[in-house]
Image: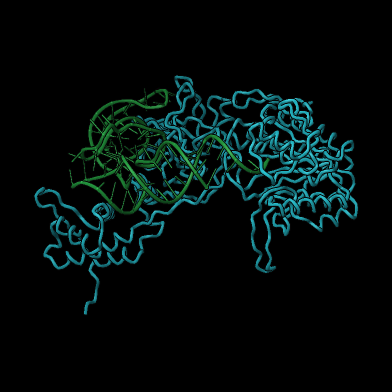
Chain colours: A cyan, B green
Amino acid sequence: MKLALSPLEVKLNHYLCGQNLSPMSRVLSEQEQLRRESLQKLRKLGIDPYPADLFPVDHYSEEIKENYEEGKEVVLAGRLMSRRIMGKASFAELQDSKGKIQLYFNRDELCPGEDKTLYNDVFKKLLDIGDFIGVKGKQFKTQVGEISIQVEELTVLSKALKPLPIVKTDSEGKAHDAFTDPEQRYRQRYVDLVVNPKVKETFRTRTKVMNAMRDFFNQHDYLEVETPILQPIPGGAAARPFITHHNALNTELYLRIANELYLKRLIVGGFEGVYEFAKDFRNEGMDRTHNPEFTVMEIYVAYKDYHWMMDFTEKMLEDLTSKVLGSTEVEFQGEKINFKAPYAKVPILDSIKEHTGVDAAALSENELRAKCSELGLEVDETMGKAKLIDELFGEKCEHHYVQPTFIIDYPVEMSPLCKKHRDNPALTERFELLVNGKEIANAYSELNDPIDQLERFQDQLKLSEKGDDEAMFIDQDFVRALEYGMPPTSGMGIGIDRLVMFLTDNVSIQEVLFFPQMKPEKKVPEMTDEAKRALENISKRLSIIPNHEANLDQIKLNVIHDLDLSKKKWDKVKKELVKHGLIEIDASDRENIKIRIPE
RNA sequence: GACUUGCUAGCUCAGCUGGUAGAGCACAUCCCUUUUAAGGAUGGGGUCCAGGGUUCGAACCCCUGGCAAGUCACCA
């Protein structure tokens, strides 16, 4: 009976049982291994690479550059972003949340005594780009005039084990070797934020936009509220919802597609102005302007109509752009867009008449359908008049509106939650705000007639029976709320992501979302099953041979035969096992290449 | 969902007609006390997205799949 396993057997078991498949034992790159070694060396020197102590930062890089004071002592912290080591003196860049500043390390200033370890070993050898450090030192200007900090004290705050992409910017502001691969940038946004300062700026602007909007509403004394995301009936928009299940209630729930119906219930309840910044969820296609979850601001104000809301919206946008950007003029993809109020107002039917010559109001559904075909639109029998008008506008008119423009008075079938137009019952009191040919806001004089509302829901049901999978559900509780009475109200929704895209000159929604939705990254198995089986086979064969060593081609033929591998597969497996150090190939004798299992 | 393009070192990218996998930065070693994307010299580093096929031989050709981007369709 064997009492102990040989080291070879232990190693094999380890691999064959999948013990080495955990993420912790993945194969590390050379640079990752070196950083882990540096980590241990720091510990040996008595330096904690992840200290718990507060670090008393008293300045940002930005402040020092704006208010330079020769010789003034400052304490800064951030990431080490570059190093230029020149013997007893070195330069480095420190990046904090506001920007970068140059550090100057002089060996004898940093280490005035006999012991030069902090400079020679810690700074020069054991620190790497990406590490967080804290420094205390004096402000000064180099001979070339760059504001720098002469470092007198250096503290390791956090060691980085993975190397950052190195992005260098030259004197003309041109980035070299920029970290640009969209997949990596979105999946590892933390890295993107570290190395691409513009990205940080986009998200700062995003927050400023929301804050400015919130301030504007609060100044009007409207109340910020929160309403359910998990809803039994997904209402307020025409869209396919996500479905989920609540275990305790044993019921299906939907992730909200809009917050409209809940906010109107609050108006019924007696609030005069309510608004919400809401994440909505739609189970639809994804592209550069659609993410499955997105942010919308919706506001409802009692005793107002859509004319008032147009006024309010343009004032809000004027206020917001001038506060956030310092100007109402925005450059988007080379196009100058001016958010200064007032904006043009164009009835949708007038717009269609202007851009296509079609007088939709005067035509029957069939006549309109024929006209649309004539104009090259794809139409089918399920499309009602409203849908045809929508298509016509979307295809032929929308793109003309580059400057902010209100398109108003949509057909009633397109707007089941909107009050009928006071002068024409075929239309509704609705506007959409178009900017650069894209909708960014949508608003109504809200429908508050409960009987009309119920009929409109029933019309939606008919559409859904006709095959429209986006027709709205009937929300009986919402109708009941209206039966208690809702004051005349105007409501408006604005797509925050799209607005931020305009204000930051981004054409992709992913650029304004920290973590855009992506398919999960595939996991590469640490070792394939074939490799494990091949290793077992090889070791079985070698274990009965003296020196555990044999001719490679002989083993290859045997293994390919035993495991029914392709030659290509054998090659892969061989490389994999060599990489893991589980077999060794000795090619010193070209005539007789040997394979062995290392001790 | 369809089509197009891409996937090679930590990062950015070359790699011709199938013939031993390359550069710059980063990294390591040595030299250097105010440098400016990059100081000098030397060196190490690869699952060429995955799987299958063709071939004496595949990063490269063929098939299937994965992920991403772009265009279109749908939608806000």
- Residue A468 placed where, x, y %? 69, 50
Q: Residue at x 68, y 60 (%)?
A: A253
Residue A181 horizontal/vertical position (percent)? 46, 38
Q: Quadrant of the C terminus of chain A?
A: bottom left
Residue A439 in view (yes/no): no
Q: Is residue A562 above or below residue A2?
A: above
Does residue A30 lie above or below A338 as drawn? below
**Along the horizontal axis of the image, is A380 left or right of A594?**
right
Where is A252 relative to A522, above or below? below
Image location (x, y in percent) of residue A179: 46, 36
Q: Which residue shows up at 85% across the image and 41% down it?
A: A420
Quadrant (top left/top right/bottom left/bottom right) for the N terminus of chain A: bottom left
Asked whether B58 or A24 is in front, the reply is: B58
Nearest the viewer among A173 and A40 is A173
Quarter of the rendering containing residue A247: bottom right
**What residue do we see at 52% from left, 42% from top?**
A186
Where does the image place residue A337, in percent across and percent down from the top left? 68, 25
